[in-house]
Amino acid sequence: MVTSKTPRLDLHGEEVAMVYSLVTEFIKDNYQMGQTEIIVIHGKSTNILTKEVHAVLKENKLVKKFTLNNWNLGETIIYLK
C-alpha cells in the first residue's frame, strides 16, 4: 500500500543520461532494505523521463511490476520482488 512514507526518488531536473544509474541504485537500496513498493517521480510534461524510467524498469530483475500512479501521472509506482 502506497503511503506518505513510501520511499520516493524525484528525478525533476535530472538529465536522461543519469536516469539509469539513479533508478537502478534506488531499486537496489530499497530491495536490500526490504521495501516492496517504491515511487519514482519523473514529471509528466514531455514524457522523456517517463519513457527512460520505464525502459530501465523493464530490464531490472528486482522489479515485479510497475504502473503509472492513476492519481498523479508524473509518478510511477514500482513493486519489488
Image (cartoon, helix red, strand yellow):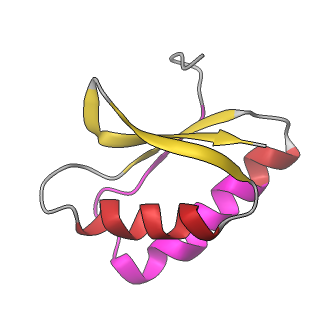
Residue 18 covered by magenta stretch:
yes
Q: Is residue 48 above or below residue 37?
A: below
Name the residue rendered at 68%, 54% in the picture: 27
Snapshot quadrant of residue 76: top left
Name the residue rendered at 85%, 36% in the picture: 34
Q: Is residue 26 above or below residue 6?
A: below
Q: Is residue 65 above or below residue 4?
A: below
User: Left or right of 21: which side holds 12?
Assistant: left
Snapshot quadrant of residue 46: bottom left
Residue 80 covered by magenta stretch:
no
- Quadrant containing the N terminus in the rendered view: top right
Q: Which residues are magenta?
A: 7-28
Q: Nearer the viewer, residue 44 or 67?
A: 67
Count every numbered label the image shows and give the total.
Answer: 0
* Horizontal and vertical percent position of residue 16: 35, 77
**What is the residue that sits farthest to the left in this orientation?**
45
Name the residue rendered at 25%, 49% in the picture: 43
Name the residue rendered at 39%, 57% in the picture: 11
* Horizontal and vertical percent position of residue 77: 49, 37
User: Left or right of 27: which side holds 43?
Assistant: left
Snapshot quadrant of residue 50: bottom left
User: Left or right of 34: which side holds 38?
Assistant: left
Q: Is residue 14 above or below residue 33?
A: below
Q: Nearer the viewer, residue 80 or 38?
A: 80
- Quadrant containing the C terminus in the rendered view: top right
* Horizontal and vertical percent position of residue 35: 76, 34
